[in-house]
Image (cartoon, rainbow, N blue to C red):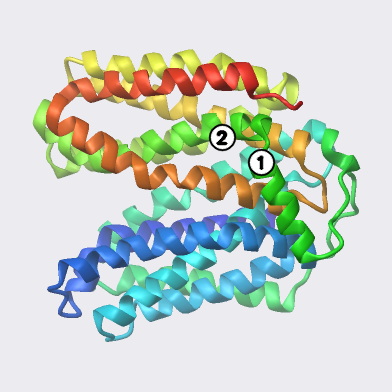
Amino acid sequence: MLAVATLALFVVSLGYGVIVPLLPELAGGRGATDEGLLSAVYAGYAAAKIGCQVPGGVWVDRVGAEKVVRWALAAFTLSLAGFLLPVGLEAFTVVRAVEGAATGLVYPAVFAMAARGPAEGAGKRMGLVAGVGTSGLLVGPALGGLLAPIDLDLPVLVALIVSAGLTLTLVFWRPAPPASSGAGAGAEVERPATAGEAFRELARLARNVAFLALMLPIAFNKLTFSAFQGLLPLVGPDAYDLGSRGVTLLFVLTGVVFALSQPVGGFLADRFRARSVALFFTPPLLAALVGMAFASSATLFAVAYGSYIGASSIIFTATMKHAATAWGSDDTYGGVFGLLSTLTDTMTIVGPLLFINLYAALGGGVFWAMAAVGLPFALAYALWGRRT
């Protein structure tokens, strides 16, 4: 089932990586002139993804992660097909929302699959799923850059074929789920009797100070990483005279370091306390942000930026392992990961608004601001980020 989880995450990452760089051109090809509607195309994805993760996590715990993955991939495949239709921008916005909803269902399901099994190997499993699965974020833009000049719809068609192929495979080949093993300290948690009780349990968890503190490293990483998606195309030309190719290489660096660092984070989280791993890599992460403010060349900036991506990726996997072993069980992983993803994904809305505006005012000083914002996150995690 680990292979299924990895492939499912790769498919949604590939589709996202293909669509996002081409989105303005795809929308423009449909006569998009209304900036408000074009903004809705972007916002609809995020809202649908965030809104579906908690219900999707509860659904995972009620019916099984494998069934949710099959339905989610079917919806994701339909959304990719929708991008190839000559529809108006209003319908195009709905298609994008379906893509976001499907992605929101996939994430808690695949991490629930990865968390199953002995606790001592959970970090490795999550690291492999996250590292290999999200490599689609690297493959997707490369595929778009290679095929879009030939035909704008061609990379979308390739992503559609890959998604449809995995969906059909899972329909006709249904591997038996692994035996329940009760990984981690949360193994005594039993599945709530009803879906309503499951939502109430998650609402109580969302008010638990220790759980909220535990998710702070991921929240800060999403806050800053979401901002970098908008900052890199600005900082590259402004500070280092990088053209579009140079900026693209920074995004390629993101994908490569992210994919390589996730398994390392899982390896470390299995051999040391997951919380200790996250704490250990927090100072290097903050130092890397400060280093970007002092980088005197594009090469030094890339080194500092790559160090930030590596540290944040290791912290992500270690924190996911911590959440699984401290708060979850085979019957509740979906809800726990759905709640964790939902609460931290709100930072992806705040990050670009905050730091891109700070860049306009501070220039390179925005990286100092990022590190300064990270300090209270780090201190709160150090004080309260443990199970009580």
Kindly state the secondary structure of the residue where label 2 is placed: helix
Specify the farthest residue to the bottom.
86
The answer to whether residue 316 is above or below residue 53 is above
Question: Separation of disc 1 and disc 2 at Cα?
Answer: 8 Å
Left or right of residue 102, residue 83 in this image: left
Quarter of the rendering containing residue 20: bottom left
Quadrant assignment for the N terminus? bottom right
Q: Are marks 1 and 2 in contact (CB under 8 Å)?
A: yes
**Residue 183 visible in the picture:** no
Quarter of the rendering containing residue 382: top right
Image location (x, y in percent) of residue 196:
75, 64
Left or right of residue 110, residue 153 in this image: left
Three-letter amino acid code of the residue under disc 2: Gln
Query: Residue at 66% of width from left, 71% of height from top?
Result: 70
Image location (x, y in percent) of residue 213:
60, 29
Image location (x, y in percent) of residue 286:
41, 17
Three-letter amino acid code of the residue under disc 1: Met
Image location (x, y in percent) of residue 352:
29, 42
Write down the residue under mark 1: 126
Mark with earlier residue (1, 2): 1
Left or right of residue 14, residue 8 in this image: right
Residue nearest the viewer, comparing 369 with 252:
369
The answer to whether residue 151 is above or below residue 332 is below
Q: Which mark is residue 33?
A: none
Query: Residue at 37% of width from left, 65% of height from top?
Result: 44
**Residue 50 visible in the picture:** yes
Quadrant assignment for the C terminus? top right
Q: Dot 2, crowdedness within 10 Å: few (<14), some or many (≥20)?
A: many
Q: Which mark is residue 262?
A: 2
Query: Residue at 61% of width from left, 34% of height from top?
Result: 212
